[in-house]
Amino acid sequence: MSNESKTKAVKPAKAKKPAKGEKSPKPDKPAKKPKGSAFLIDVTLPASVNFVPSKYADAETDQIIHRRLFYSVSGVLLLCGLVYLGATVNSFSADVFLKNSQLRIEEVRAKEELFKEISAEESHIKFLEAARISAAAAGIDWKTLVNQIVATYPNGTSTTSIDVLPIGNTLVGSTAVVPKDALTQVNLSLVMKDYTSVQTWMDRLKGIPGYSDSKLSSINAGSGGYELKLTVYFNAQVLAKRYLEPIQVGEVGN
Amino acid sequence: MNLPKRYREMLISGIISVVAVLVTMNLGVTPMLDAATNANLGTSQNDAILNVEISRIHHLQMLTRNNQIVAQQVTQISDAMPEEPRISQMVDMLNGFANSNGLVVTELTVGDPEKYVIPGKVHAQHEFQAAMAKAASSIKDIPVNLTVDGKFDSLLQFLDDLGNSPRVTLVKSYQFQKGQTPGNFTLQISAAVFMVSHK
């Protein structure tokens, strides 16, 4: 008997012909069960018969799918619920911590009220300290500065006058251009015996801390020597910066 | 669209899952997480404030223990920047400086207190800015003009004493002139003695 006679189609087979170029199934592998109602019986497999009608077999598959879908959706919903619950607990505990910290601050602030008097004294000291710093801010250590200027004088120089003008003011009638950084100006009126040392002296003035510029306004020959008028400008470096050391309230040594 | 029943069900289940996740995240979890983050931030800020407040309490307790020192400091700083002009004390102080340096005050005029304006270039110095922001508007200065005669070095020392006096004094301008007595100078000073108007 040929193979064709062993295989009998239960229903007229409507197997598609393989397309051109498509490989035909290998003969040693069992042929796949075709989808749909048409299929072939493979005689190489042990004989078995499924008596369950296809209608009921599909229902069973549907039930399996239903069950899986139900579990999946339930799982997702449960997960969402758990995440929501976790977020709620987290948010609630954060709120509790926040309220507790606010309560603690209020308690401590209430305690501060007990020290109201000493606290007022402290703030008064701090206010007056700030006022003292501000008031003395424009102060200059004049003794040091004048001594530094006098120390630069050439031998045989005598002071006729020293004028110091308020910051920003200039001598009446003066047309001199004030340097931009100048805070104060010192006008010197001197008598020098030796005229030739003026330039050297002016160079020495540049060594004074805070020196900004100097302008020689006149040199006149007089009976005692040469009368010089010179303006020296100084910048912010000459500020004494008094009282900047903060007062340690309640501690000795301030 | 005619989908098979099982695919329809799968699609519906998927949609339910996605909607559930989106609703949970957007309406529930995300706002609560944001709220929790804000609350945690607030808590950590409050903790920082609390630490400062506790340090402050400790500081105030220390001040209470050392209240005598605090009282001395109040007196000292109030003498430096009083709330009243205290003219007679001021004149005594100036005479005291002159006497201690062997000088003679030949002229002294005291003006009325007026609002003190800090020179712009000094105002720009960063060291003073915090203090100025706190108290500059409350400062008044009492203009004082005085003339003293004496030796140059003594006059310089007088200037130094003024600048470092317990009552805050600013030497605004001055002029040394050769005096009539040989070796002596006349020093004319324009100064400001300070007070505070109110706290």
Image (cartoon, coloured by chain):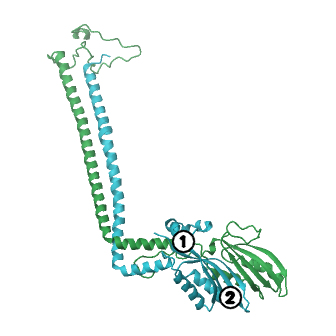
Residue A46 shows up from this direction: no
User: Looking at the rendering, which quadrant does residue A136 occupy?
Assistant: bottom right
Q: Looking at the picture, how far across and down is residue A43, in whole percent? A: 21, 16
Out of A189 and A33, give the one closest to the viewer: A189
Please, what is the three-letter code of the amino acid marked with disc 1? Lys
Q: Colour of chain A?
A: green
B52 on left or right of B189: left
Decide: is A157 above or below A79. Answer: below
Please, what is the three-letter code of the amino acid marked with disc 2? Phe
B38 on left or right of A33: right
User: Looking at the rendering, which quadrant does residue B121 occupy?
Assistant: bottom right
Out of A147 and A138, give the one closest to the viewer: A138
A76 on left or right of B126: left
B38 on left or right of A160: left
Q: Looking at the picture, how far across and down is residue A40, in whole percent? A: 24, 14
Q: Chain of mark 1?
A: B
Q: Are marks 1 and 2 on the same chain?
A: yes
Q: Looking at the picture, how far across and down is residue A178, in whole percent? A: 72, 68
Give the quarter of the figure containing the N terminus of chain A. Answer: top left
Say which residue appears at 51% left-offset and 65% top-offset. B133
Q: Which residue is mark 2?
A: B152
* In the image, farthest residue toward the left: A51
Tag nearer the camera, 1 or 2: 1
Q: Looking at the picture, how far across and down is residue A121, in whole percent? A: 39, 74
Say which residue appears at 48% left-offset and 76% top-offset. B82
